[in-house]
Image (cartoon, rainbow, N blue to C red):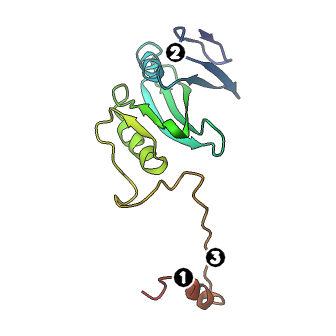
Amino acid sequence: MTTTPSTFQLDIPEGLVTGTTVFRDEVTLHASKVTVLALLAHLKDVQKFEMLTDETCVDYYPKEPRFGILYQLYSLSRNIRVRVKVMLSEYDAVIPSACSVYRNANWLEREVYDLFGIVFEDHPDLRRILMPSDYQGHPLRREIPVQVEENAFSFNRARIDAEKPRATE
């Protein structure tokens, strides 16, 4: 498959990509979780995208598939970027770990696991990285209600402190 945005050309073997989006000269390759490791290895070894700059997740709640795993890749030698996107169901939020292709995916995947609850198969050390180990849930999932706290100033501090459950501890 050949993708030709205005800035560069990619030659991707058949079956690795399910679709391509080009928006404002940013290329997004859509893949399935079955083929994502082969696609990432091809982009790294053949297309020379040597650097995984970010791996993150987007929660599209209440849509299904709910989660989008995004890999931001950069080619140092060609000075170009590409994004790989894999959609995951809420009921099967498991994807292979990219640590075997990009070593720095280790910490990025731990962050996604901690904040969204996505499980990365064959990850070398999948455990919480930001939240306490006894924390229940995943705070960046959209079903968690947003909590807004009013700023305390001299004129409203007594009222705000009275409303806080542990303000006097």
Q: On the rendered image, what quadrant is the N terminus found in? A: top right
Query: Which quarter of the picture shows residue 102?
Result: top left
Measuring from the top left, give residue 47's x and y in whole percent: 48, 15
Measuring from the top left, give residue 141's x and y in whole percent: 55, 51
Q: Provide the secondary structure element on which disc 2 rests.
A: loop
Labels 3, 1: front one: 1
Rendered view: 28 above or below 110: above
Rendered view: 135 above or below 117: below
Query: Which quarter of the picture shows residue 81?
Result: top right
Crowdedness of circle 2 by 10 Å Cα count: few (<14), some, many (20+)? Answer: many
Q: Nearer the viewer, residue 94 or 5?
A: 94
Rendered view: 67 above or below 76: below
Query: Which quarter of the picture shows residue 101?
Result: top left
Q: Provide the secondary structure element on which disc 3 rests.
A: loop
Measuring from the top left, give residue 59's x and y in whole percent: 59, 44
Residue type, mark 3 in image: Glu
Residue type, mark 1 in image: Lys
Residue at screen point 48% across, 38% down: 93
Residue at screen point 46% across, 89% down: 168
Question: Which label number is shown at residue 150?
Answer: 3
Residue type, mark 2 in image: Leu
Question: Which label number is shown at residue 164?
Answer: 1
Compute the Cα span from label 2 to label 1: 53 Å
Crowdedness of circle 1 by 10 Å Cα count: few (<14), some, many (20+)? Answer: few
Q: Nearer the viewer, residue 153 or 60?
A: 60
Compute the Cα span from label 2 to label 3: 49 Å
